[in-house]
Image (cartoon, rainbow, N blue to C red):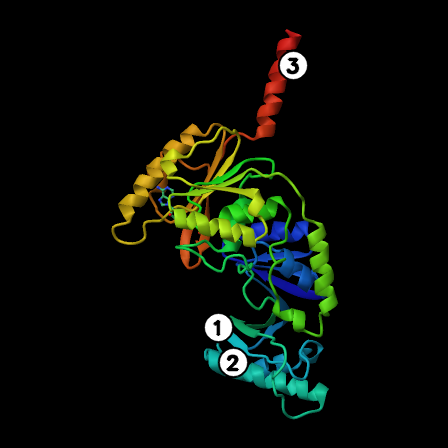
């Protein structure tokens, strides 16, 4: 068994843990910005293909106390590198340090590189490694007295699903968009609307969730070239994931005032294979209406970061408040970093969650409507009570 680490944006740890649980992993350790879990080799493929909120999946090679460069060298050399790296492996070493006595990160990187070479020499009986083969990105992280060594199994970050070559302006990371949907009360049988959809990331991620389509189905993964996880395993996991796709009728809507953004969103949805699942429209927020009840409005409106944009974003939040008040029984979810958002929107949130949008600290404001089930049960209870009378 291995220890794998799924990394995520700060604030998404609990959602990521929930995702891992629903994939069947039980032994989870939730930490800041990551979840560690026990898995087998096949799970490298499974986790990369299925996880929606993870940024990367790493193999935890080892963690040990390293107060001196010698300890770092010996601890690294003792790990089973040749179980993973073939003799022609390319293995760049990145590094970071926090509160460590070993302050020079470049020196630590060089020592780790040298120790891995020594370890490989022992197994492969050769003095020189060409590094012309598959890539194994290694990271050394020094946190206090502990050195942690990992190999990155994702290559390109998992937010790059492959459907969004053109991002539009101020796009949301796909992993964060999926997190916003998974943090909401939206279920595939409810309506979802993003009235400031931009490149369409929130509706597209919701459609992938609603259709149970694995987010990594359309992209390649670097470790598919690693001898340790045979290509066949990747193909089998991909096939299994394809068989899980549900063919459901979804009611997902994306609109934006910018016609070019809507055209881009439509193209992205086609690329993601969810073209038929989302309805797109060019529409200013002020004209947004819905005949449905119990829907979820999820959006990432402009934050008004640039000078001069502040007032426009504030008027938009006032507008959003008006639209929300007309949506009967809906739940509203808004991500912004504007500290006065609730004042302009006109209501205090039922719940606020701090989430990082890249380097920006933002708040996910959540305004809960009644649950359809609860209202239904209540209506039934009333009807029942009337009958009794
Ligand atoms: C931060 S971006 C949204 C990015 C989007 N989540 C994505 O992933 O691409 C904000 C969007 O709000 C749209 N917007 C600004 N004012 C609007 C209005 N009055 N009505 C509708 N959309 C508006 C902009 O055109 C922009 O696409």
Q: In the displayed structure, does residue 309 sit left or right of residue 128?
A: left
Residue at the extreme left of the image, as rendered: 308
Mark closer to the chain start, 2 or 1: 1
Residue, x 71% and y 87% (percent of image)? 124
Q: In the displayed structure, does residue 109 sit left or right of residue 82?
A: left
Mark 1 within 8 Å of ligand 1, using the beta carbon: no
Q: Nearer the viewer, residue 193 or 100?
A: 193
Mark closer to the chain start, 1 or 3: 1
Q: Nearer the viewer, residue 62 or 311?
A: 311
Q: Judge whether residue 118 can be spotted in this image.
A: yes
Q: Position of residue 102 (x, y in %)?
A: 49, 78
Which of the labelled discs sits on residue 384, or is there none? Answer: 3
Please, what secondary structure does the residue beneath circle 2 have?
Answer: helix
Q: Residues within 10 Å of mark 3 (few under 14, many from 20)?
A: few
Q: Residues within 10 Å of mark 2 (few under 14, many from 20)?
A: many
Is there a contact, CB below 8 Å, between mark 2 and mark 1? yes
Give the Cα distance between marks 2 and 1: 9 Å
**Residue where numbered disc 1 is placed:** 97
Give the Cα distance between marks 1 and 3: 65 Å
**Which quarter shows the N terminus?**
bottom right
Q: Nearer the viewer, residue 113 or 379?
A: 379
From the viewer's perspective, is residue 132 above or below residue 194? below
Mark closer to the chain start, 3 or 2: 2
Residue, x 55% and y 66% (percent of image)? 156
Q: Residues within 10 Å of mark 1 (few under 14, many from 20)?
A: some
**The quarter of the displayed image where residue 371 is located:** top right
Residue, x 63% and y 12% (percent of image)? 385
Residue, x 64% and y 82% (percent of image)? 77
Which of the labelled discs sits on residue 108, or is there none? Answer: 2
Q: Judge whether residue 145 can be spotted in this image.
A: no
Q: Position of residue 279 (x, y in %)?
A: 51, 41
Mark 2 within 8 Å of ligand 1, using the beta carbon: no
């Amino acid at each position: 068994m291995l220890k794998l680490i799924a990394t995520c944006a700060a604030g998404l740890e609990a959602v990521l843990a929930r995702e891992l649980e629903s994939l069947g992993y039980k032994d989870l350790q939730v930490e800041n910005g990551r979840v560690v879990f026990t898995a087998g080799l096949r799970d490298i493929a499974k986790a990369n293909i299925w996880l929606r909120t993870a940024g990367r999946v790493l193999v935890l090679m080892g963690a040990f106390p390293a107060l001196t460069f010698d300890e770092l060298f010996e601890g690294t050399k003792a790990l089973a590198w040749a179980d993973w790296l073939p003799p022609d492996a390319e293995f760049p070493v990145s590094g970071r340090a926090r509160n460590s006595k070993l302050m020079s990160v470049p020196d630590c990187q060089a020592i780790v590189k040298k120790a891995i070479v020594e370890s490989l020499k022992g197994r492969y009986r050769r003095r020189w490694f060409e590094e012309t083969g598959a890539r194994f990105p290694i990271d050394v992280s020094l946190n206090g007295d502990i050195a942690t060594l990992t190999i990155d199994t994702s290559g390109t970050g998992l937010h790059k699903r492959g459907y969004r070559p053109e991002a539009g302006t101020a796009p949301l990371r796909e992993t964060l968009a999926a997190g916003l949907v998974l943090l909401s009360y939206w279920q595939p049988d409810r309506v979802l609307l993003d009235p400031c959809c931009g490149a369409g990331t929130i509706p597209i991620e919701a459609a992938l969730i609603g259709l149970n389509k694995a987010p990594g189905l359309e992209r390649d993964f670097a470790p598919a070239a690693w001898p340790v996880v045979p290509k066949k395993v990747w193909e089998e996991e991909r096939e299994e994931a394809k068989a899980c796709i549900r063919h459901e009728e979804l009611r997902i809507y994306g609109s934006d005032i910018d016609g070019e953004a809507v055209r881009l969103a439509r193209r992205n949805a086609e690329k993601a294979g969810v073209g038929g699942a989302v309805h797109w429209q060019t529409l200013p927020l002020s004209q947004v209406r819905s005949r449905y009840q119990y829907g979820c409005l999820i959006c990432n409106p402009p934050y008004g970061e640039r000078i001069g944009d502040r007032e426009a974003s504030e008027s938009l939040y006032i507008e959003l408040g008006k639209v929300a008040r007309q949506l009967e029984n809906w739940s509203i979810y808004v991500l912004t970093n504007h500290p006065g958002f609730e004042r302009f929107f006109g209501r205090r949130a039922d719940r606020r969650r701090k989430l990082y949008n890249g380097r920006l600290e933002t708040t996910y404001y959540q305004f809960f409507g009644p649950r359809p089930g609860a209202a239904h049960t209540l209506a039934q209870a009333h009807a029942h009570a009337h009958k009794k009378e």
